[in-house]
Image: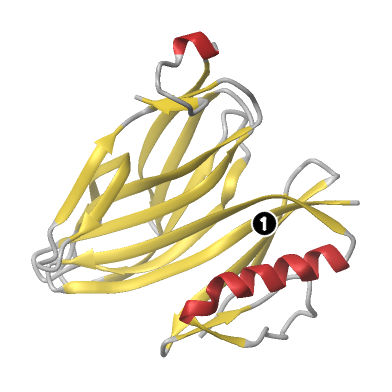
Amino acid sequence: MSSMSTESQDNERKESYVVEWILADGVFIVKSPLKEPGLTGPDIPRDHQLTALKDCLKDVATQGYKVLSTSSFSLTNSHSQGNSGSTDGFVVTVEKK
Amino acid sequence: MEKTKLDLLTICDYALISQDNKLSIIGTFDQIFVTNLPSSHPQFYIVGILNGTANKSEDLALEIKTPSGADAIPPQKIKITIGPNGKSNLLATIGNIPISEAGFYKIRLSNIDGVLGEKEFGVFRANKQNITQKSPNKYTN
């Protein structure tokens, strides 16, 4: 189970890319939007999630983009019987060099 | 089947679910003061308490809109399950959100039926002299 999304802002020079990982059986699957559609990144153990971001930022840099900011998000659902799901990811805002 | 409703939507400095599944919300605020723009806010939590049909699962979308209507971060989706008591909590941690402009930002939570609720927070410019904390260039209230 994995998903990826990209987002472009109105400003022509700035584009936002979402790097999203979703927990699946203790493994984070990371997708870089700069890779070909349908290709997944390597499976990343949970404690290596920052390495995954770093790799992605490296990818971004080699593709001729400058990173403007990196945000993170984490959504968790819980109820009286425990947690029932979560989604985590990074939002990397870049501009063309 | 009962429609899902939002009992509470707020933003705060910190929120947690304890081991016995109780929700704690710490330091709610609705104003962020910055000295410079563009800026960013290091971390805040969005907390929603939902009320609906027990054990029902559904997809929710969380949006954060800037005063000019752009997405502060791209909309996020999550599948939630309402608990056996008809209640469910949603916690969102947002780190280093870019703050590009002053004005009122909108946090919006929606499901397939439409918007469940909105929460506004204001971003204001403040002089450094007016910010009394030791070192940060912004504070919340």
Q: Position of residue A88 (x, y in %)?
A: 47, 67
Question: Between B52 and B67, which is closer to the camera in this rendering?
Answer: B67
> In the rendered view, would you say A42 is above or below B112?
below
Residue receiving disc 1:
A92
Nearer to us in this view, A33 or B110 = A33
- Residue A19 lies in what quarter of the image? bottom right
At horizontal 30% and vertical 46% (from top left) the residue drawn is: B14
Residue type of the residue flagged with mark 1:
Val
Q: Position of residue B89 (x, y in %)?
A: 24, 58
Residue at x 38% of width, y 38% of height: B118
- Relative placement, left or right, of B45 versus B104 is left
- State the residue in front, B37 or A17: B37
As drawn, A79 above or below A3? above
The chain that hosts pointer 1 is A
Q: Give how far across and how far down residue A66 sits, in percent.
A: 82, 53
Instruction: Determine the image quadrant of residue B35.
Output: top right
Res. B3 in view: no
Q: Residue at x 33, y 41 (%)?
A: B13
Crowding near the residue tagged with mark 1, few <14, some 14–19, many ≥20 C-alpha atoms within 10 Å: many
> As drawn, is B20 to the left or to the right of B15?
left
Q: Is residue B68 left or right of residue A45?
A: right
* Secondary structure state at the residue bearing disc 1: strand
Residue B20: tell me if it is visible. Answer: yes
